[in-house]
Image (spheres, helix red, strand yellow):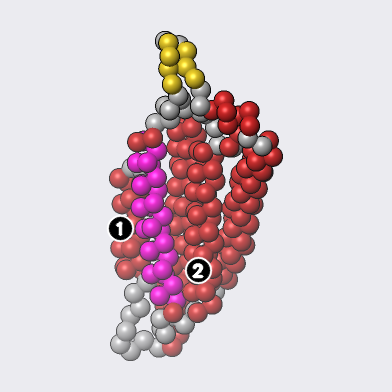
Amino acid sequence: MSAEDFQKKVSIRDSLAGEIEIEGGGSTSSTVGTGVASQTLVLLRSLLEIQQRRAQAYAKLKSGFSEYVESGAEPLYQTLCSEITTEFSECSKLVREMESQFLNPQVGRADLAQLLSDIQNQEKQKLHLTVTIQVLKKAGRPSERMLTHENCKFKKPMQHECVHLHEITEAAGTEEAEADAEFDNALKEAIRGVQDAVTSINEYLEDIRYEIEALEAH
């Protein structure tokens, strides 16, 4: 992740501080109303920008995981996971700050605060299930996992007594089949959960866009 990406958290917060400040003093109700609408518009547009950051982070995580599967470069993958975690944490922090702004009596938009909270919950679920999918894929189906021979006895070079032979020949076939079925179900459930979360998030974002259009029309 580039330094420019992480610097966005500073620029977004600074821009919010500068743009959403409402003038006090002798403002008329009309001026205050206009200021609140402008503040709301800035916050909602910033939310869409944050969601774009999240989408880019997911794309980077997916690409990095594919590279890890092919290369097996564990340190690089762990570094990427750390960077992505930091990015998601910063995005969540910014959205929570927006929730507080909407709950401010001067703004009085508890409905939008709730909408942001719903998005946050779905994003949390999406991230959790995305990690679950990668963990499952990393482990692989039980029947396809490679065996190691660390505990085998070597009598001659290139010849050894494989301790797995006993397991393979005597283990009930149904146990392996059940393990594979459990793995497949867990993976399918996680994938379906991610899809459901994405659908919900998109619906919430559509409501956000409608709100933006309504504010821009005034």
Q: Is residue 89 above or below residue 36?
A: above
Q: Amino acid at mark 2?
A: Leu
At 52% across and 49% down in the image, what residue appears?
132
Asked whether the beta carbons under mark 1 and mark 2 sit within 8 Å of each other, the answer is no
| Nearest the eye: 31 or 137 | 137
The answer to if 84 sits in the magenta stretch is yes
Q: Which residue is mark 2?
A: 116
Callout 1: 10 Å neighbours few (<14), some, many (20+)?
few
Callout 2: 10 Å neighbours few (<14), some, many (20+)?
many
Predominant secondary structure, magenta span: helix
Range drawn in magenta: 76-102
Q: Is residue 207 above or below residue 166?
A: below
Q: Which residue is mark 1?
A: 10
The answer to if 210 sits in the magenta stretch is no
Q: Position of residue 54 (x, y in %)?
A: 46, 52
Q: Position of residue 194 (x, y in %)?
A: 59, 53
